[in-house]
Amino acid sequence: MKNLFLMRHAKSKWNENVSDQFRSITEIGEFKTKKVANYIHQNFELKFDQIFSSKAVRAKETSQLVKPILFPNQTIHIEDDLYT
């Protein structure tokens, strides 16, 4: 059976003077993302065959935060079409 695991990006900064695609994540978003990734790692046996992220800065930052915890040996594929 194939499984699809979706993760939303971390809390992003709304006060940055940039377009939506270029907003980065907050410190609280970074902290909570690592906390969730560690919880998932400790409580579930997940194996990831492929990892995808949109090109949005906050999505790429989030995927880089969870990579060493959830899929350290995987490549993250950045897909332009995932940002809409």
Image: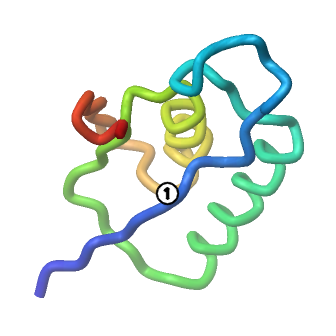
Q: Secondary structure at mark 1?
A: helix
Q: Residue at x 72, y 38 (%)?
A: 12
Which residue occupies 22% across, 51% down?
50
Q: From this view, report whether residue 20 is shown above or below residue 50.
A: above
- Residue furthest to the left: 1
Rendering quarter of residue 20: top right
Residue drawn at (36%, 70%), measured in percent from left and top?
A: 5
Residue in view at x 65 percent, y 24 percent: 23
To which residue does mark 1 refer?
Answer: 70
Quarter of the picture holding the N terminus: bottom left
Pinpoint residue 63: horizontal percent, then vertical percent.
Answer: 50, 41
Q: Amino acid at mark 1?
A: Leu
| Residue 82 coordinates in the image, percent (x, y) | 29, 41
Compare residues 22 and 48 and report the one nearer the observer: 22
Where residue 35 sits in the image (x, y, percent)? 76, 61
Residue at the far top in the pictured view? 17
10 or 13: which is nearer to us?
A: 13
Q: Quadrant of the C terminus?
A: top left
